[in-house]
Amino acid sequence: MGVGETTGTTGGGAEAAALAADVVRYPIAPGYRVNVRKGPGTQYGIVRTLPYGMSVPVYCQKPGERVSGPYGTSNLWDNIASGEFVSDAYVHTGSDGYIAPRCD
């Protein structure tokens, strides 16, 4: 090998880390512990409860039960992980509409 040549592959780990760094997280309303549901409504079971001061990613959004919260009244539910939804009325996205693709 000549001077300045390298072997090996490009860092797939670095690419994955860069993609993870690109995920935008949105803050939950201050002073609220928000229930995470299995679907877009309060009739769905609670998966967990988010602690105070939490920020969440929003991968997609889905219409569902209309909920009133600190950021208004909305029927949008934010998918924050596989099978996990929170009402958009408790997430500071800066918009009353979609900020992510619609969930299938």
Image (spheres, rainbow, N blue to C red):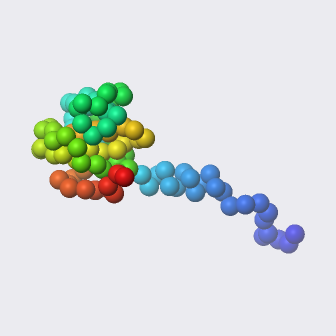
Q: Measuring 34% from the left and 48% from the top, which residue is drawn there?
A: 58
Give residue 69's position: percent from left, percent from top.
14, 38
Vertical comparison of 4 with 95: above or below: below
Q: Measuring 43% from the left and 41% from the top, which residue is drawn there?
A: 82
Can residue 24 be seen in this snapshot?
Answer: no
Q: Measuring 79% from the left and 69% from the top, which residue is drawn there?
A: 5
Quarter assignment of residue 4: bottom right
- In the image, 61 versus 8, the foreground residue is 61
Can residue 81 be seen in this snapshot?
Answer: yes
Q: Which residue is at the far bottom?
A: 2
Seen in the image, is 83 located left or right of residue 95? right
Give residue 19's position: percent from left, percent from top.
50, 55
| Numbered label tally | 0
Give residue 74's position: percent from left, percent from top.
16, 46
Seen in the image, is 15 located left or right of residue 32? right
Q: Measuring 87% from the left and 69% from the top, which residue is drawn there?
A: 1
Vertical comparison of 78 with 19: above or below: above
